[in-house]
Image: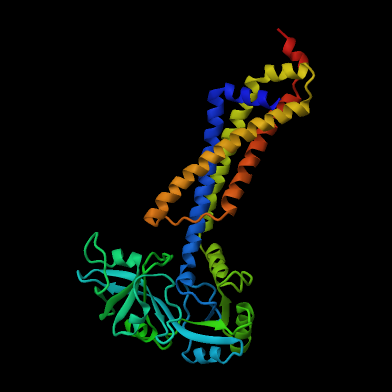
Amino acid sequence: MFRLAIQMLFGDIAKYLMLVVGLFFATFLIVQQASVFCGLMRWTTSTLRNVPAPIWVVEEQVEQVNETNPLRDTDVGRVRSVSGVAWAMPLYSGIQRVRLDDGSFKTVQLIGIDAASLAGAPPRMLEGNLESLRLPNTVVIDELATARLSPVKGGRLKIGDQFEINDIEARVVGICDADRSFTGGPYVWTIYERALQYSPPQRKMLSAVIAGPVAGVEPLEAAREIQRVTGLRAYVTGKSGGDDENFAWSTIWWYVRNTGIPISFGTTVIVGFIVGVAIACQTFYAFVLDNLRYLGALKAMGMSTWRLSAMLMVQALTVGCIGFGLGLFATAGFARAALENKQPPFFMPAVVPAGAFAVIIIICFLAAMLGIWRIARYEPAMVFRA
């Protein structure tokens, strides 16, 4: 029975290809746009991965990592005084303008870390070493900065090259691997005191306090204690904590609530679903009508409506799996190009293809139901009419 259903499906090449193409485009639009959206949301939390720390302590109104409401310098000591905290270090994070040798300006994400412990330093160094940051007027840059901050088009900065931040020399002593920021600018690390010199002076300059719990205490437990004792907002950065306690999820939900990004990408995903439904349902219904006399003959020979329905369902699921596979393959090609160029942002968690496959199955089910509805109303005697 199922073999016959497949033979009937492949027998009408035109409609078979139309079904596959429709589901291919639906899969590609859904998976590609959802993955780019996830990649963009991942960019919003890049600072948390580039400046690793179990706990971030910020001003009580801060809801996302790219928002900096300065703290008082004394807040570092207040966090250190909490019993569940093993260490706490100051952190500066802000967007600054870099002046290149040719006189042009570029924006960078400047990170200032503690000179003694180097807590918050980039986790993956490619060239140089972090200890050189303790030398005068030195910085560590990411790979993007080597190209973006080069005064020569197509050139790359090397260790020993220099540029200016706020008219103060910055000499490159290290190059690291870092995730790209949401603002698009490269990351530049230096020690905390020098970051304050590079930045325009303000009354309060401390962006955040990064901390770690004592042995045997979970970061979430220590963060809650910091919040209770100091009145500051303490977030964890691992997988623990709810959406309001995990800095990454709090940041993502802030962008979802306060920007038009979800609407923009969600509209394209909905369009992909509509395209799939329109093409698949219309084409599959036409396919059933073209083969109605054969299906009616089978019904006249005693095949039940349930068995005919199963045949139609197998046909719909077959084209669905093929269209989904081709769409996923095309998305993989897009992903490879995006990852090589490092834009647009692309990140495909397992839930994206799984969700897309569920959507394609729903589309196939709807298409099959139209055919089932038509064959259920078809009388076997109509086969013998002239």
> Can residue 285 be seen at all in this image of the molecule?
yes
The structure residue drawn at horizontal position 26% and vertical position 68%, both measured from the top left corner, is 157
In the picture provided, is 25 more to the left or to the right than 7?
left
Please identify the quadrant where the C terminus is shown: top right
- In front here: 366 or 307? 307
Task: Please tell me which residue lies in front, 331 or 232.
Answer: 331
Q: Residue at x 41, y 67 (%)?
A: 178
Query: Picture coordinates of residue 21 (x, y %)?
Result: 52, 34
How is this picture coloured?
Answer: rainbow
What's the residue at 24%, 59% (across, down)?
A: 154
Residue 93 location, x and y as percent? 42, 77
Q: Quadrant of residue 13?
A: top right
Residue 233 figure quarter: bottom right
Front position in the image: 269 or 312: 312
In the figure, residue 110 lies in which quadrant? bottom left
Check the image and report above or below for 382 versus 41. Answer: above
The residue located at (39%, 86%) in the rendering is 115
**Any part of residue 59 in sight:** no
Q: Is residue 372 above or below residue 207?
A: above
Q: Residue furthest top?
A: 386
Image position of 64 (left or right of 284):
left
Taking 266 as reference, is 171 above or below it? below
Task: Report how many numbered discs are placed on residues in the image.
Answer: 0
Q: x, y (%) of residue 73?
A: 46, 90
Residue 354: x and y, percent?
A: 60, 49
Quadrant including the N terminus? top right
Q: Residue furthest left?
A: 102
